Amino acid sequence: MLADSIGIIYMALVALQTCIQPAVTRLCVAPTVSGQSLVLMENAVSMLLAISLSPRSAFTDWSVMESAGIVGPPAIMYALRSFFKQAAYRRCTGVIFNVINQTKVVFCAIAAWMLLSEGQSFQQCLALMCAVAAGAMLVVPSKSTSDTEKVKVASSASGTLFALATATCSGIAAALSQVAMRTSSRPSTLFNFELALWGLPFVVLAGGRINLRLLLEGWQWRTFLPVALQAAGGLLVSAVVKLKGGVCMGLCTVVGIVVSIVADMVIMHHVPNVRQLIAVLLAGFSILAHQFSADQLLSVGPAVAMLNITLQ
């Protein structure tokens, strides 16, 4: 009974974090803050949270070389995703980001088929097609009749492409996470720690030579809020999947997308158009149709959690 209540609370928190993350990032992160500094801080906070929540026994037989070989590939892909994600947060609304981000299921299915020879049922294929349709409705620009509308389309195009790149990296990284978890099972908190740990070298190298002054440029106390929110969201997702299963995580995703419409209206004063609302419906249907037919998702555990960490 207590576990069910805790699970419901975690589900509500995940849905809330999903819907407000893009808006909070746009409000709290100044344009001068570098994406590299945000990703570095996000990984550092994720490591601290994961260590504090990991059982002591998790590190008893832990090996640096084994961890790097198993978790390194998905960690690098998730680190690359973080760069795209931070860029997308600053350029598109929460509704657009969350809907396009659900196409990660398509990329995950393709990568899982190539890496693990996992096929999809007919219902799942239909669900994936709905996800593609939802993303296409937002990626393909609508016909603009006024100069103002054309400017708005041009300004959001880059954010849409960054969101699509985020979904691509998320899907591939999720499949790599499944490979890692099948190779060596480990607690979800330890897995989160390893993802952040082995993602750090890539973030440092990808950003080139680090200038401490430029790295901290634009940082304020409020800049830490979206970073902490992002790190906490990853751990909450893992907890939801462990307590309630992958299907419930899908429900959280749908609720998060719907609530993000309200969040955008209240925080960013942005009212979604008809095309965006239809895309939301298609995305919600694709998530429910895919996860309610995917019984195997309930047993994947942390790998499913990693699939859903990038809901924001």
Image (tube, grey):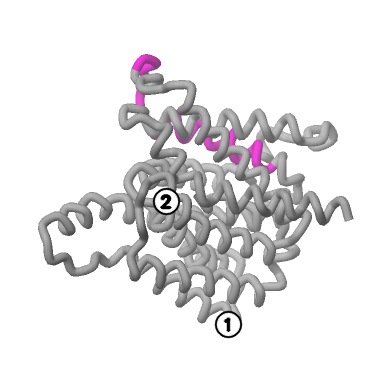
Residue at the spot 59% in from the left edge and 38% down from the top edge? 231
168 relative to 306 in the view: left or right: left
In terms of secondary structure, where does tag 1 sit?
A: helix
Q: Which is more toward the observer, 8 or 39?
A: 8
Give the residues in magenta.
191-213
Separation (CA) of disc 2 from disc 1:
32 Å
Q: In the rendering, which numbered label is found on residue 200?
A: none
Q: In the rendering, which numbered label is found on residue 123?
A: 1
Q: Position of residue 234 (x, y in %)?
A: 62, 44
Q: Position of residue 130 (x, y in %)?
A: 46, 76
Can you identify the residue that label 2 sits on?
264
In terms of secondary structure, where does tag 2 sit?
A: helix
Residue 250 seen in this snapshot: yes
> At label 1, which amino acid type do we have?
Gln
Which quadrant: the N terminus? bottom right
Residue 175 seen in this snapshot: no
Q: Residue furthest left?
A: 147
Q: Position of residue 46 (x, y in %)?
A: 61, 34
Residue at the spot 65% in from the left edge and 41% down from the top edge? 192
